[in-house]
Image (spheres, rainbow, N blue to C red):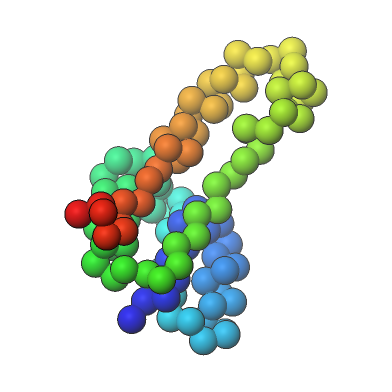
Amino acid sequence: MIDTFELFSGSSKFTIMARRCGPNPLQPFDVEHGPQQDLKDPHVRAEVVKAAKKFKPWFLIMGLDCRLWNLFNVNLNYSQRLDLLQELQEDELPLVETRMPIGPSSD
């Protein structure tokens, strides 16, 4: 039985701690683990959904990078470069819109 599945895991801290504490985690997914795990790729996202449906983890954690989406960036860091911020947000949008349809009503 799989207890946890971590997406956008970065350094996979949650999965590492889960292994130490007892829950049985599925391999984490993040582009930091290789280009074959780039969740911006629709084929990779489809494989992740397939894995989630197959293993039915009790807990799915998605650690999205929120730095491009906070008001601090809009008002300060990118206030003079809103077009650049919009480009960066558009590049990240597939990740933000990722859905994991694995519950009972998703079949």
Asked if residue 17 shows in the view, the reply is yes
The single residue placed furthest to the front in the displayed view is 105
Q: Quadrant of residue 24?
A: bottom left
User: Left or right of 18: which side holds 26?
Assistant: left
Q: Quadrant of residue 53?
A: bottom left
User: Left or right of 40: which side holds 49?
Assistant: left
Residue 7 position, x and y percent, is 46, 57
- Position above or below: 4 against 67: below
Give the quarter of the figure containing the N terminus. Answer: bottom left
Q: How many marks?
A: 0
Q: Quadrant of residue 79?
A: top right
User: Left or right of 12: which side holds 102?
Assistant: left
Residue 4 position, x and y percent, is 44, 71
The residue positioned 52% from the left and 71% from the top of the image is 15
Asked if residue 26 shows in the view, the reply is no
- Position above or below: 105 against 56: above
Residue 57 position, x and y percent, is 37, 69
The residue positioned 30% from the left and 57% from the top of the image is 102
- Position above or below: 19 against 69: below
Give the quarter of the figure containing the C terminus. Answer: bottom left
The residue positioned 65% from the left and 15% from the top of the image is 82
The single residue placed furthest to the left in the displayed view is 107
Residue 95 position, x and y percent, is 45, 40
- Position above or below: 94 against 4: above
The residue positioned 62% from the left and 32% from the top of the image is 69
